[in-house]
Image: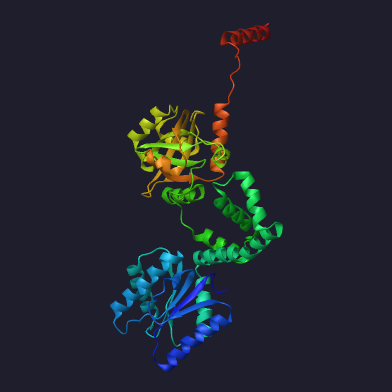
Amino acid sequence: MLVPGSILVIDDATETKEKRKVNDLVNSLRKDGESVLFSDSMPDNENFFEKVRLLIIDLYLAGSNKDESYILCANIIKKIIEKSGLLIVAIWTKHVTDTEKDKQIVKELGDIVGISKVIFLEPFAKEISPKKLVKKIKDSMGSKPQCGLLLETEKCIEKARAPTVSDILSTASIHVILGSLREEIGDVALHREIIYLFLKVLGRHSKPNKEMEAYVKQIRKTSPKIDSTKFGKIFGLQSYYEVNSEEPTWTGDILKKDSKYSVVLTPACDFAQHKRRPIDYIKTVSAKRINSDNLSDKESLKEIKSTFKIKKNIEEIPKAILNGSGLKDRFYVLKFVKDNQNAIFHLVLDFQRVTNIPFKKDAVSLQEGGWERICRIDTPIIDNLLQKYSTYSSRIGVKSIPSKIIKSIADKIERASDS
């Protein structure tokens, strides 16, 4: 398999010799088992763009006018990206002359497209036979470790899909599986629980291969340092996820009302049984927002130190927020949350500020009360949060020994040792 997903070939060749070459390329790829689509211009049917991972395109679709051709190619690439998320572009044209021109073509087209999710291979001359073209594309992708790792990872997931379905269905029928899940979590989140089941089993069947290992080694040798912004985005991607407005309210939902933030603590089992035992209120814990840039501003750090009673130097406050050191047990930090404007921030939850919000039926009723759901906390973060809250709220005080008694015992020991 050259790439997971589909290959889209776009070429408006009119000369018999060129048309034969294009047909040979398409037939050769299909013979190798690739999923190949062909068009001689911008496809009208947008279904063409779904699952496309590799675009082999003639640079001069609009004729000999360079500017028009580049804009048309760029528009096609943008259309595909909207549907597929990642695209590798192989330009196949008779206008390639030398290496410098190749680089210029890629740069100019890349500037017009302006999307980081596009990987341009060097342009290939049409004098190359279809068989050699496929080999060159493969070699070119292999020379780009980031591109190679992404494709190999996707191939592993694609390969795991069939055994995942087989594994699940060999256990029980869909009817029995639904019934089992329903007993566990009720009707409210049944559709999402089915997805979780498939993803969990998919992860077990997705096995890394040697190619992935090789690409990882290459990337680690040349990989630049990751700044806090990039790290925050990756951390957030693993820790939170967006849900649509129709989805029911659930444990771990992060809510916002004006400038206030709250996190839903009501157990999932209560939401699952909501139809049989209606919930009148949901339990939430209040949170204070700290913008990422606040952690590099001295005045903001002073305010954070005072608000959360952190007994550390100003320089140590960012560390206290990001790893929880120096914070009292009543506080819990959700790091690198993203709002609807893609701003990254942190939320400090206060377990002493737990409140109840009226709840009629679902997320819509919360919206009527002015609450907006930002995202949902994923496992294991939500599990850790609930555990910390449970530990804090169920703590039991015991009688302590007075300091005077401890001092008197210490004095006796000291006197005895002197004698």
The quarter of the displayed image where residue 149 is located: bottom right
Q: Observer-nearest residue: 2 or 44?
A: 44
User: Which residue is most to the front?
Assistant: 276
| Rendered residue at 67%/60% (across/down) | 169
Give the vertical position of 194 relative to 12 (above or below): above
The reply to whether residue 295 is visible in this rendering is no
Among all residues in the image, which is located at the extreme bottom? Answer: 16
How many marks the image carries: the answer is 0
Say which quadrant the C terminus sits in.
top right
Q: Please, is residue 359 above or below residue 87 in the view?
A: above
In this view, 362 is above or below 313: below
Left/right of residue 288 with respect to residue 377 in the rendered view: left
Q: Is residue 67 left or right of residue 400?
A: left
Is any atom of residue 132 visible in this view? yes
Q: Which colour scheme appears in the figure?
A: rainbow
Taking the view exactly as shown, the residue that stands out farthest to the right is 171
Query: Residue at the spot x=38%, y=48% of the render?
Result: 340
Where is residue 351? Give x, y as percent. Answer: 49, 30
Front one among 72 and 269: 269
Give the quarter of the figure containing the N terminus: bottom right
Residue for point 55% across, 74% down? 2
Q: Position of residue 339 (x, y in %)?
A: 39, 46
- 61 vs 264, left or right, is left
Q: Is residue 329 above or below residue 416?
A: below
* Quarter-of-image position of residue 305: top left
Image position, residue 327 (x, y; %): 48, 30
Where residue 135 sits: x, y (%)?
53, 79
Q: Nearer the viewer, residue 137 or 391?
A: 391
